[in-house]
Amino acid sequence: MLSKRFLSTAAGKARFTQLTNGLVIASKKVPSTYTTIGVYTGAGSRAENPYNSGVSSLLVQSLANASKDAAAKEGVIVDSENYREVSSISTTIAKGNEAAAFKTLESILANSLKSLEDASFIREQANIAGEKSDAVELNPEQTVIEHLYSTAYQGTSLALPVYGKGEVVSTLEPADLISFFKKSFVASNTALVATGDVDHEKLVEFASKLNITEGLKPHVQPAQFLGSEVRFRDDNLPSAYVAIAAEGESLLSRDYFVAKVAAQVNGSYLNSDPTSALQGSKLSTIVKENHLADSYYHFSTSLIDSGLWGFYTQSSNIINLDDLIHFTLKDWNRFSTTISEVEVERAKAQLKVLLLSKDDTVEKLNASLGINAIVSGYEQSSEEIISRIDKVSVADVTRWAGSKLWDQDIAISATGQIEALFDYNRLRNDMSQMRW
């Protein structure tokens, strides 16, 4: 019954076309009064280096902002976003105004170098981007997650923050953006993506007219996970904020959904929500009965060739922070030994709800499609997602946990009042000990 209900409301299957120059065109019809059409390129923060950190975010921000006013007069909203492995410039329009969106995107790409050569404009945009980067440090959760990547992938470009380092962004010049644009915005590294009431054939026709340079997809440094930690104790903050992760699965891994299901075994917890303790999770029961945390959530995030599997927590019970971490890691041990069928089935049901019943905007749906277009040139339908989740068994979770969690190195990131957080070696030992 659950699968049928999801399928009855799911969006249509995405269509993909690849031109001879390597440019990918992806579209998905969804019932909406708005349509989002965007250009996505495999050039997020991972394509940067320590000396031009933030250039990908600044680049798409500058190109989008250079055309915002003119586009608005045509009824087109222009936006940009940067991710770890993808960056984008998107347009959102009311149904039936696709021609204006095409015109805007064509103008952005055609006038890109002219926009990037304007030194005063780039300086202004760099200041804005620098403030955006600095703002991340004001949010403890964002700070901890960014630092988790920085320590887990230290020495590689994956360690660089998504929006760059504020002190570096403010020093970037037109030449830096132009060089990055020429290297990254090549047809084999770019996708034209649309979500909403869109005609795929018209999208392909428009894409074939775009002036995008041909070239090889830029090489990126392979991911390399390193067990390590980064801590920044700040007793001015009201709580402790901690994230711990082992290396997870890549986007194309055969165990992608196994890891997703495993993350939902303990799922999330919010102390202020009375239903959190009723979700059936052993960990949430322990946390609730002993008031160990204000909230936590488990995650399984994936990259092209790596991923992070772990949890993030916020706790005002700073004295018993060590107990919270101990019981969490001990519960992870259980995944490779005594995880039950009931827990796995409940986790599978929760994952379906999480992935397939989101009330996402066309902008978010388009971003997801754009990332899939860049990474694999394919997006799974709702039926395929449900089928793959249904196939996950207790044996799969046990096998996966035995190789990915049991006695594996972890990355730790923490800030706030973390005096009670034990040293790295003590926490690392909790990844294998059977003693409670």
Image (cartoon, helix red, strand yellow):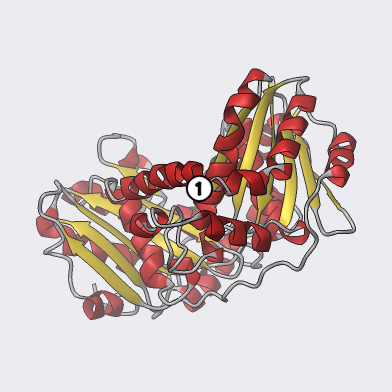
Q: Position of residue 19 (x, y in %)?
A: 88, 54
The kind of residue on which mark 1 rests is: Ala
- For label 1, the SS is helix
Q: Position of residue 128 (x, y in %)?
A: 40, 42
Instruction: Name the image quarter holding residue 392.
Output: bottom right
Q: Residue at x 17, y 49 (%)?
A: 239
Looking at the image, residue 395 sits to the left or right of residue 182; the answer is left
Instruction: Give the vertical position of 190 relative to 89 (above or below).
Output: below
x then y, percent, for residue 280: 39, 47
The foreground one among 332 and 41 is 41
The quadrant holding residue 3 is top right
Q: Is 350 left or right of 41, judged from the image as shown?
A: left
Residue in the picture at 47% in, 63% down: 52
**Residue 184 visible from this viewpoint:** yes
Q: Which residue is mark 1?
A: 119
Residue beneath the point at 59% across and 38% down: 64
Q: Quadrant location of the C terminus? A: bottom left
Residue 341 visible from this viewpoint: no
Residue 249: percent from left, percent from top: 56, 67
Front residue of 347/271: it is 271
29 shown above or below 423: above
| Quarter placement of the N terminus | top right
